[in-house]
Image: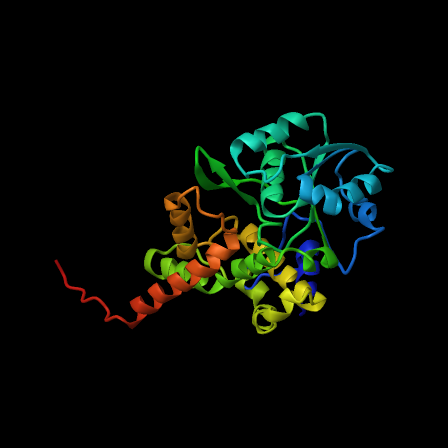
Amino acid sequence: MTAQDSIERLLAGTYPDPDGAGTLRVETRKVVIARSLAGAEAECIEDLPLGRRLAVVSDPITHALLGKRVEHALAGRAQIQSLVLPDHPHADEETAHRIAAETISADALVAIGSGTINDLCKFASAKAKKPYAVYGTAPSMNGYVSTTAAITVHGHKKSLAAQAPLGVFLDLGILAAAPPRMIRSGLGDSLCRTTSQADWLLAHLLFDLPYRLAPFSLLAEDEEPLFAQSDALIRGDIPAMERLVRTLLLSGFGTAICGSSHPASQGEHLISHFADMLGDPAWPPAFHGEQIAVTTLTMARLQERLLQGSAPRVTAD
């Protein structure tokens, strides 16, 4: 089974659950991964129940990169509202509320962007009980299809309940031309599968926390080849980018299937969030995946140290 087959089977509800619970299903209905989406932007959404009034949400960079093109393509099929957020928007509660208020007459949201724009739209649309779809602009994180959003509330970043997009549309040419730091961020976000799985399994063995094989089964075929050819990502290699994109989507689907971030967020993410809270606001901001790449190594060393230690002696009281 190829990774693309995995995505297709998930969308169709025919992927066999390795935990023996029938088949796996996800909320997302359509995924398009193509070398180019030029000329096919409207076709991407034509089968989705998004309504006739669409609010296209972007920032100045993503609007120039892809937003204008999508708005023009969709204008023949729907009434378009263009909402371009200010430069460098933050995924915080205030911005999400602003999006919900300014798109109150829209039937659905269409996100043009990656981490920040996607999180804002999935959170705002969920609160407004509207569907949304996303045209991705960078392979910077695994949250495109997850059912949670990383939203800052009163200065603290939280993982809040949101919703998955009905459709995800990824132009590999655009993604391969993304800033190298954003590409490395996506690769870094993929690195933590190892420490997350180890932490989750340990919690299962020690505290009987429910544990599932499904999210890791989805990643099994692509993970090793992805890291073997990671250098090609920075050279703009399209096949390597497609493998990264599939890995990010399948990781996000894994969290959606489990209904929690357990498969992709454990101790390494806690260390990263701790660094966020302790960091000086004057420091240059880091992408989430950049931090996770570093904190995954930190967590792996901690896990290794624990495993190398002697087992604690257990005595009766």
Between residues 285 and 155, which one lies in front from this camera angle? 285
Residue drawn at x 59%, y 40% is 88
236 w.r.t. 143: above or below: below
Residue 287, placed above or below residue 71: below
Using the image as rendered, state which of residue 198 and residue 57 is in the foreground. Answer: 57
Where's residue 49, x and y in %?
Answer: 76, 39
Task: Please report the residue visible at 56 percent of the width from the left and 72 percent of the height from the top.
Answer: 224
Quarter occupied by the C terminus:
bottom left
| Image location of residue 198, percent across then percent down | 41, 64
Locate residue 134, reporting x and y percent.
69, 45
297 left or right, relative to 167: left
Please name the residue shown 61% across and 40% down the image: 122
Q: Position of residue 138 (x, y in %)?
A: 65, 53
Seen from this angle, which residue lies furthest left?
317
Q: Is residue 67 left or right of residue 95?
A: right
> Can you see residue 263?
no
Q: How many marks?
A: 0
In this view of the protein, can residue 54 be seen by the observer? yes
Q: Quadrant of residue 91?
A: top right
The residue at 42%/58% (across/down) is 295
Please give left or right for residue 262 compared with residue 250 in the image: left
Which of the pair 312/15 is nearer the observer?
312
- Seen from the viewer's position, the closer of residues 298 and 180 is 180
**Among the 4 quarters of the image, the one containing residue 21:** bottom right
